[in-house]
Image (spheres, grey):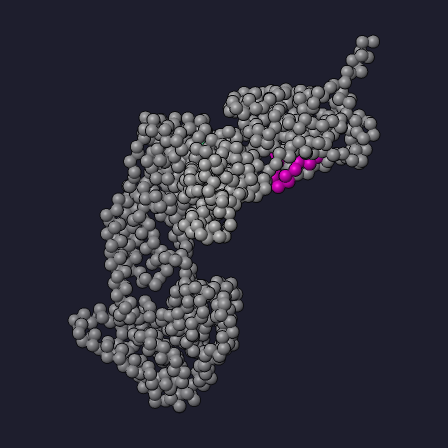
């Protein structure tokens, strides 16, 4: 348009390559963008740019953009239209793309392509001579007759349309007000023309040529309209309306025949969709909403972004399992067998799960508490959930909640947003296709919170049996009955589960495994699974139990079995290579012999023991000899051991003691180190400590200072005032792990007692317990995990608070047999047990005095 053309376009333009439709100056076009280069242009130029200049782009017609950005740029159409991007709408349906609304400004010609990636940019020359537009009289003189003729036809055409339609009336006014030079482009884009014709008009740079070429098009349209009016005389009004509505709806885009067909197809689809809606078993409320939406859809032009949204919505509504469910088959005896077959150990958990299932069988409803398995990673929480689904014959779906901090993740986005979608619950139902699956809500302890609302609050509604029969997802906007879904949650710790959510759930602790349990799990479950996954058979690989123990102690340090499983996978992969190579060589014996030059090895059969994989000669083994994984092979495959028992080395100096800590990942042993130096009685603490830990340290020092004489503890200068001219530094190594909790109290006391007495703490002792200022030892939590960690680390004696004695019952007998437990009720007992030969209390001088 005149106003548009009055601006000078930049000499460098980013190029948008389009294949369908031709944008002419003065007209507006909606175009869909989905190829990598075009998407890049939209993202980095249109969505990021802030100036008016950054919204001007060059639209190159008749050039399809390669689908991959590494493909070469195709040859570009020489002439394009500089355009103003008026609107950008993004959508993810059916694949990520943008819809651009662009208005043509003027023609340009590409002089030189400056760059191709990430999107093409070219140096351009503006073609439409702007002075023509501003200096109307001159141009009118030159082209007088031609433009007059054109104008007449244009008026004739517009007057054949229904003037009562506002768009037509506006068009009529524009014909008089616009400069004549702009009319060919604008009218060409309004009337029914093919892309080819539009392209010719675009390429007609000279105005005279343009007028000449458009006149026949106008005449053709006029004739067409006349014919239409004649054939449908009785319904003349209607015709006018149809013709008029079309330009109104897509003023620049009158459908060609092919598009007509597409539209019809789509119409058929909509009819089908309606049929599906009517025959689906959705709730009455949902049906009502759907019918309303389909009515709207029928009236909507397809190019509207909302068309896709609405259709997407309706398709989801049809797909949802409103009434579809699987039939429960529950037989407790079979369930017990299945749980036992799938999982070794974890007796407490299996027992509780069976109780839960038994109650369900008898009561036949789900209004019980929601089970929540809490334990370190890799102990089989998810896997038990899967087994429950299997025993019930239900579908299983896992919803990972770790890091979810937006309640729309659970409850969906309202449909007013671009790219809105349903929440994870509804999505899960769509995936499984039935309304009674087992949903595993994984990692409920890692739900976040943000400005977008609290996802835990949304979960509350999902999990509450009183409310969840009418759960309303924001996207669906109608209630869906979740009461048939069986929810199971998992977490690493209950400390971070929001209290209201915790209240809805029954917590079942799943502790870590002992070494023996891990060996059994590996041999009964993990190794067979890994062999199968790698296409190996027990005849090809042999992993003895000592090797498994080596992997457990030297290559993993975890409460569960996940990294053990991964290491076994690595071994299987390495063996698979050897086996495959071996087979390859067997088929070509000549080459193997020539290559290796070890022909005699091939005949070793009778007394040959299974060879180590580290032995390269085993490539020539007969096929039935399994590859034995011994420690050398382990080192070859997994590298040098990652964890060596460092305990005794670290305890070779006074001022170090081993504590036991509980973390969400299971129990851990923790070294506490202390040193002293000249100073002014200050205490320094390092190693990511929480407030409670700092308080424990202060308590420990106070207790030792008050008992220094009794234990003959002195500082460097021999004084019983331990902090006199002395600074103390306490360090809790493994600085990346935040440590908090009172249970390190006894360890700090022991460590400092060692420092001030100069005696070594026994290297095989670990301890845990809270202390009071008067020297009592109070009970702490997580005893089972802590004991298992100590056992893993090869420690022999464990000091625990007297009142935790009852917790020992939970620990497997074989672990208990390996360890000696010292129950302590006061710090004297702790120190006596921690040092070889006890920590003698000096006879008190005062007590002698009192006799006098
Ligand atoms: P979690 O959910 O607790 O992090 P998973 O359920 O994903 O752990 O378990 C990790 C792997 O360990 C799975 O392959 C599972 O089959 C296996 N596994 C864990 N515990 C046992 C067990 N007691 N018996 C058999 N396999 C187990």
- Residue at image position (30%, 34%) is 328
The x, y position of residue 68, in whole percent, is 43, 64
What predominant SS class does the magenta segment belong to?
loop
- Residue at image position (47%, 40%) is 604
The x, y position of residue 158, in whole percent, is 29, 77
Nearer to me, 801 or 32:
801
Q: Is residue 157 visible?
A: yes
Q: Is residue 731 magenta?
A: yes
Question: Which quadrant is the N terminus positioned in?
Answer: bottom left
- Residue at image position (45%, 69%) is 72
Quick check: 833 left or right of 304? right
Query: To which quarter of the image does residue 178 belong?
Result: bottom left
The x, y position of residue 807, in whole percent, is 54, 23
The x, y position of residue 836, in whole percent, is 69, 23
Q: How many marks?
A: 0
Where 735 falls versus 87 (above or below)? Answer: above
Quick check: 294 left or right of 691? left
Q: Which residues are magenta?
A: 730-740
Query: To which quarter of the image does residue 805 belong?
Result: top right
Nearer to me, 480 or 181:
480
Q: Is residue 566 visible?
A: no
Question: Which quadrant is the C terminus positioned in?
Answer: top right
Query: To which quarter of the image does residue 136 belong?
Result: bottom left
Farthest top residue? 852
Where 150 falls versus 167 (above or below)? Answer: below
Q: Is residue 363 magenta?
A: no
- Residue at image position (28%, 58%) is 298
Where 163 falls versus 414 (above or below)? Answer: below
């Amino acid at each position: 348009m005149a106003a548009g053309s009055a601006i000078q376009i930049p000499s460098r333009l980013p190029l948008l390559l389009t294949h369908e439709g031709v944008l002419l100056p003065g007209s507006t076009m909606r175009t869909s963008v989905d190829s990598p280069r075009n998407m890049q242009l939209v993202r980095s130029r249109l969505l990021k740019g802030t100036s008016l200049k950054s919204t001007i782009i060059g639209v190159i017609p008749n050039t399809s953009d390669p689908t991959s950005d590494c493909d070469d740029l195709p040859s570009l159409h020489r002439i394009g239209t500089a355009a103003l991007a008026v609107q950008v709408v993004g959508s993810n349906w059916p694949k990520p793309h943008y819809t651009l609304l662009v208005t043509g400004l003027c023609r340009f010609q590409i002089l030189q392509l400056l760059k191709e990636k990430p999107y093409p940019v070219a140096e351009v020359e503006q073609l439409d001579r702007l002075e023509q537009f501003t200096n109307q009289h001159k141009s009118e003189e030159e082209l007088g007759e031609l433009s007059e003729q054109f104008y007449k036809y244009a008026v004739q055409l517009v007057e054949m349309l229904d003037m009562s339609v506002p768009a037509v009336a506006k068009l009529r006014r524009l014909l008089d007000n616009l400069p004549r030079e702009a009319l060919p482009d604008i009218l060409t884009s309004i009337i029914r023309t093919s892309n080819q014709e539009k392209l010719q008009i675009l390429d007609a740079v000279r105005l005279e040529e343009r007028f000449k070429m458009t006149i026949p098009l106008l005449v053709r349209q006029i004739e067409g309209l006349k014919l239409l009016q004649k054939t449908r005389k009785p319904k003349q009004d209607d015709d006018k309306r149809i013709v008029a509505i079309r330009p109104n709806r897509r003023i620049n885009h009158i459908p060609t025949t092919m598009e007509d067909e597409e539209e019809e197809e789509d119409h058929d689809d909509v009819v089908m969709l309606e049929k599906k809606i009517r025959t689906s078993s959705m709730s009455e409320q949902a049906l009502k909403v759907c019918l309303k939406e389909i009515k709207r859809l029928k009236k909507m032009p397809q190019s509207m972004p909302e068309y896709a949204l609405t259709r997407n919505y309706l398709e989801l509504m049809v797909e949802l399992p409103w009434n579809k469910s699987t039939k429960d088959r529950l037989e407790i005896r079979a369930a017990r067998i299945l749980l036992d077959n799938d999982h070794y150990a974890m007796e407490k958990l299996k027992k509780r799960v069976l109780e839960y299932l038994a109650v369900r069988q008898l009561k036949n409803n789900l209004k019980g508490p929601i089970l929540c398995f809490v334990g370190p990673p890799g102990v089989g929480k998810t896997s038990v959930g899967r087994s429950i689904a299997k025993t019930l014959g239900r579908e299983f779906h896992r919803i990972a909640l770790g890091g979810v901090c937006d309640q729309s993740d659970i409850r969906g986005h309202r449909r007013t947003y671009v790219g809105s979608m349903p929440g994870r619950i509804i999505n899960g139902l769509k995936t499984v296709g039935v309304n009674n699956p087992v949903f595993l809500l994984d990692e409920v302890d890692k739900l976040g919170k943000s400005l977008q609302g609290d996802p835990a609050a949304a979960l509350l509604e999902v999990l509450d049996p009183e409310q969840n029969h009418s759960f309303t997802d924001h996207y669906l906007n109608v209630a869906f009955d979740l009461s048939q879904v069986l929810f199971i949650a998992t977490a690493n710790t209950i400390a971070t589960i929001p209290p209201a959510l915790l209240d809805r759930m029954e917590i079942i602790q799943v502790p870590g495994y002992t070494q023996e349990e891990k060996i059994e799990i590996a041999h009964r479950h993990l190794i067979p699974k890994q062999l199968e996954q790698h296409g190996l058979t027990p005849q090809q690989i042999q992993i003895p139990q000592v090797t498994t123990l080596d992997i457990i102690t030297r290559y993993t340090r975890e409460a569960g079995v996940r990294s053990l499983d991964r290491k076994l996978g690595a071994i299987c992969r390495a063996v698979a290579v050897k086996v495959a190579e071996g087979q390859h060589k067997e088929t070509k014996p000549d080459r193997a012999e020539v290559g290796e030059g070890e022909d005699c090895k091939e005949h070793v059969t009778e007394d040959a023991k299974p060879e180590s994989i580290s032995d390269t000669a085993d490539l020539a083994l007969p096929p039935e000899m399994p590859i034995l994984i011994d420690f050398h092979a382990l080192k070859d495959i997994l590298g040098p051991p990652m964890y060596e028992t460092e305990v005794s080395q670290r305890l070779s100096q006074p001022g170090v003691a081993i504590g036991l800590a509980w973390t969400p990942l299971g129990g851990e042993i923790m070294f506490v180190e202390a040193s002293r130096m000249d100073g002014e009685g200050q205490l320094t603490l390092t190693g990511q400590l929480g407030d409670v830990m700092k308080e424990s340290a202060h308590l420990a020092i106070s207790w030792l200072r008050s008992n220094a004489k009794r234990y003959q503890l002195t500082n460097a200068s021999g004084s019983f005032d331990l902090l006199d001219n002395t600074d103390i530094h306490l360090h809790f190594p493994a600085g990346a792990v935040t440590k908090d909790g009172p249970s390190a109290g006894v360890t700090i006391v022991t460590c400092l007692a060692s420092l001030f007495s100069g005696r070594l703490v026994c290297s095989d002792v670990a301890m845990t317990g809270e202390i009071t200022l008067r020297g009592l030892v109070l009970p702490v939590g997580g005893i089972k995990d802590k004991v298992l960690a100590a056992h893993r680390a090869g420690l022999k004696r464990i000091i625990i608070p007297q009142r935790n004695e009852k917790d020992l019952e939970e620990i497997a007998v074989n672990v208990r047999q390996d360890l000696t437990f010292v129950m302590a009720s006061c710090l004297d007992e702790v120190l006596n047990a921690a040092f070889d030969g006890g920590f003698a209390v000096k006879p008190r001088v005062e007590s002698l005095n009192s006799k006098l």
